[in-house]
Amino acid sequence: MSSRTRALLNPRAAAPAFAFADRDPSPDLAPFVECHWVARWSLPAPYEQRILACSCVNLVVGTHQPGVHGVTTSCRSVVLEGDGWAVGTRFRPGAFRAFAGELELAALTDRVVTLPDVFGAAGRTLDLAIHAAGAERARLALLEDFLRARRPALDGDALRVGRIVELARAVPELTQAAALASAGGVSIRVLERLFRRYIGVGPKAVLRRLRVQAAVDCASSSDDVDWAALARRCGYFDQAHLIREFKAAVGQTPRRYAARP
């Protein structure tokens, strides 16, 4: 599992009946798209997949919850059953603003909005075409052609938001919004405004999700975790802070998550 698919918690639990993989976007779309992803399942019984998504918008077409998925502020569960599939595009932080038109990104937070509601008739046409295409390569090509047809352009603020989020990912010591604003060369008020316009949530929510995701990664990669050291490495005040925030986001303590099958 690559770092780009890590939003899935325990993705191998239903293997081989559930498969998930990511795909690189074409170079011309790379400034906007972090990755495309594909999922397919054939399940003898209902399967609950928990998702701790990044602070990014996803465009999804398939047999389960198609639409534009906004940034989520908590872990969510998806119950899959029978035979199904989905393809999606995960946009870079702030980049979906270029495709959103008059839609406010905050209106997408914790919501799934249908493709026609976001893109009009073109969204319905895309959905029908991808269902008819069948093959993964053809489906992803249709997604990319759809995005190109929107003739997107990143403005200066979108680029700044993307750089600031990448800075937060790269420097775990930036645990406070004020410190992130200073490192990004903007005031805290400007940072708040930019994040809400281009991501849909404020910088505190983004930093909180990055901290939890880093803790999930560490808990997933070792059978013998020094939880106090992990708390310091991921930017928590102490181990108790890590446990509280981890449990609130993931639904279980980090020790229990690390011990899962």
Image: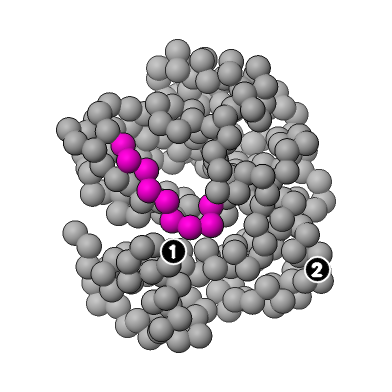
Dividing the picture into quadrants, the one containing residue 97 is: top right
Estimate the spatial distance between the alpha carbons at disc 1 and disc 2, rounded to whole Å. 26 Å
In the rendering, at what x and y percent does residue 89 appear?
54, 37
In the rendering, at what x and y percent does residue 158 appear?
75, 50
The residue that appears at 68% across and 49% down in the rendered structure is 106
In-image side of 151 versus 73 (left or right): right
Q: Is residue 161 magenta?
A: no
Residue 2 appears anywhere in the view:
no
Read off the magenta span: 72-80
Tell how many labels.
2
The residue that appears at 65% across and 17% down in the rendered structure is 121
Quadrant of the frame with the C terminus:
bottom left
The residue that appears at 78% across and 36% down in the rendered structure is 102
Residue 72 appears anywhere in the view:
yes
In the rendering, at what x and y percent does residue 179 appear?
70, 78
Residue denoted by label 1: 249
**Amino acid type shown at disc 2:** Arg
The crowding category of the residue bearing disc 1, from other C-alpha atoms within 10 Å (few below 14, some 14 to 19, many at least 20), is: some
Q: Along the line of sight, which residue is nearer the eye, 37 or 193?
A: 193
In-image side of 1 versus 158 (left or right): left
The residue that appears at 45% across and 33% down in the rendered structure is 65
Mark 1: secondary structure: helix
Image height of 84 relative to 98, above or below = above
Residue denoted by label 2: 189
- Label whose residue precedes the other's in the sequence (1 or 2): 2
**Amino acid type shown at disc 1:** Ala
Mark 2: secondary structure: helix
Image height of 141 relative to 67, above or below = above
In the rendering, at what x and y percent does residue 191 appear?
76, 65
